[in-house]
Image: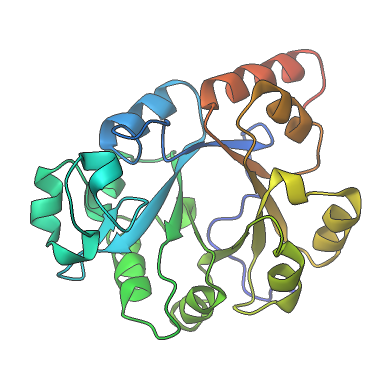
Amino acid sequence: MFPLRIRCDPRRTPGRLRPLILGHRGLPGDRVENRLESFKACLALGADGVECDVQAAADGVPVVIHDATLQRTTGRPGRVADHPASRLEEWGIPSLARVLEALPAPALLNLEIKDFGARGRGLERRVLDLVRAAGAEDRVLISSFNPLVLARLRRLDPRAYRGQLTAPGWVGAVASAGVGSPHGVHTHLDQVTPARLEAWRRRGLAVVVWGADTVTALEQVLDLDVDAVITDLPAEAVHLRQRRAAAGRPR
């Protein structure tokens, strides 16, 4: 299905247990998520990597924050897009360049590009340039809810991993459309069924699950044939995976 071998592929992870465990925004918490300290703490717990959110500051520099506004995670009013990256960094919001520098190999990074516009503003190119400059192409997954982001990524670098994020209620519409030719589907746990898993596997897609944020949900997802799980509970996920491996039940 994909004639060009992608540089980072969650389906092929020699030396790592399956599924891969990625801390959702590092570790959860309004004033903690998507911070350098949170990412480092998540890796120290044994996670394979982290998931983080990338959007553009006022000067176009990619910065790592989930919300379009600042209030929840910094206590400040206003929008991310109204401030340059240097000011945002003073408030604890790291640039993507800083994150790539702070998290060296073998840490995996799932970069979710937050851009819902129909027309590109250059964010995809800037992200790819930073990943290349850091020499991190073989450990970066890029995902987005916007299939047009993935289409732009494909034009810029067809070997960069592209994951189509889907939310409950519209997984079928987007994942089946194939806009952007994704290499993987990044779907909520509630949307995973045996039939969908089989269909995604037939298409050669990687399957990454998010929303497994309780121990019960983690146990459920570890029973599935998925490639990675993005979770608020990376420590618990690591423990459960290790326990299953010791019992001879690795995926």
Residue 169 falls left or right of residue 64: right
Residue 217 falls left or right of residue 82: right
Q: Residue at x 59, y 19 (%)?
A: 236
Q: Residue at x 13, y 61 (%)?
A: 83
Q: Position of residue 55 (x, y in %)?
A: 32, 62
Q: Does residue 13 appear in this view?
A: yes
Q: Position of residue 140 (x, y in %)?
A: 46, 54
Residue most toward the front? Answer: 77
Q: Position of residue 148 (x, y in %)?
A: 52, 79
Q: Residue at x 42, y 28 (%)?
A: 42
Q: Does residue 11 appear in this view?
A: no
**Closer to the camera in the image, 123 or 65:** 65
Q: Position of residue 151 (x, y in %)?
A: 53, 80
**Closer to the camera in the image, 209 or 140:** 209
**Closer to the camera in the image, 111 or 77:** 77
Residue 95 falls left or right of residue 10: left
Write down the quadrant of residue 112 in the picture. Answer: bottom left
